[in-house]
Image: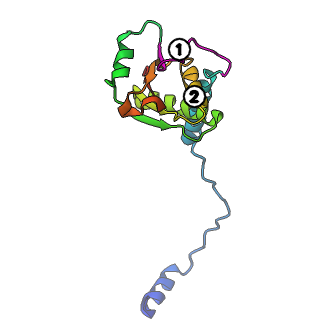
């Protein structure tokens, strides 16, 4: 609270001052960086989804453990994946998701691995109706960033998971 003397001193100093007229409004500018980053992320996800075709049938032996090795890769990579020499740096659990949701999540996983420079990922498919367990490898072998994949060893999920090596 101001005392009476301070108020009268203030009024004396302000005598004859003309008040400013403020009649313009300057709207805040939208953050272009955030908008551009969001657009870029959406485009990258769409680009990644481009590789996942439901019609493509790769030559995968579905009788034994799921495995795939990209051309011109060292065949020792599959052995290392099978033995558990690579530790997953990121995990994706697809339990309870539909095929379309799983496809989006896979695209986001690969995109994240590229951004964060993560070379090994684990995808938990679960058992269920085996729909995702059969489809996930078919999608993954189509993506150019996937170097190799193998059914995970027991400590990383066993038959219900797939280890993936990503080219970062």
Residue 150, given in percent of the width and then of the height, sits at 44, 21
Examine the image and state in which quarter residue 147 appears.
top left
Residue 70, given in percent of the width and then of the height, sits at 47, 12
Numbered badge on residue 44: 2
Of mark 1 and mark 2, the one earlier in the sequence is 2
* 133 or 70: nearer the viewer: 133
Secondary structure under the numbered disc 2 in the rendered image: helix
Mark 1: few/some/many CA within 10 Å (<14, 14-19, 20+): few
Q: Is residue 5 above or below residue 28?
A: below
Q: Which residues are magenta?
A: 54-69
Which residue lies under the disc numbered 1? 61
Distance between the alpha carbons at the discs numbered 1 and 2: 31 Å
Look at 38% across and 27% down and name the residue there.
Answer: 153
Determine the residue located farthest toward the top in the rendered image.
72
Look at 54% across and 40% down and name the residue there.
Answer: 95
Examine the image and state in which quarter residue 60 appears.
top right
Look at 52% across and 35% down and name the residue there.
Answer: 126
Residue 89, given in percent of the width and then of the height, sits at 38, 33
Determine the residue located farthest toward the left in the rendered image.
85
Secondary structure under the numbered disc 1 in the rendered image: loop
In which quadrant is the C terminus drawn?
top left
Numbered badge on residue 27: none
Tell me, yes or no, whether the highlighted magenta stretch contains residue 60: yes
Mark 2: few/some/many CA within 10 Å (<14, 14-19, 20+): some
Circle 1/circle 2 CB separation < 8 Å: no
* 21 or 46: nearer the viewer: 46
């Amino acid at each position: 609270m101001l005392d009476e003397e301070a108020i009268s001193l203030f009024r004396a100093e302000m005598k004859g001052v003309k008040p400013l007229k403020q009649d313009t409004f300057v709207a805040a500018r939208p953050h272009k960086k955030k908008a551009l980053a969001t657009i870029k992320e959406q485009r990258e996800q769409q680009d990644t989804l481009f590789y996942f075709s439901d019609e493509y049938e790769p030559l995968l032996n579905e009788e034994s453990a799921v495995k795939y090795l990209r051309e011109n890769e060292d065949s020792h990579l599959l052995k290392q994946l099978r033995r558990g020499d690579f530790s997953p740096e990121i995990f994706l659990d697809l339990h309870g998701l539909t095929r379309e949701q799983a496809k989006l999540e896979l695209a986001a996983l690969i995109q994240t691995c590229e951004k964060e420079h993560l070379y090994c990922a684990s995808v938990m498919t679960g058992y269920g109706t085996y729909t995702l367990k059969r489809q996930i490898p078919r999608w993954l072998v189509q993506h150019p960033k996937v170097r190799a994949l193998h059914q995970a060893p027991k400590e990383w999920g066993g038959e219900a998971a797939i280890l993936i090596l990503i080219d970062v």
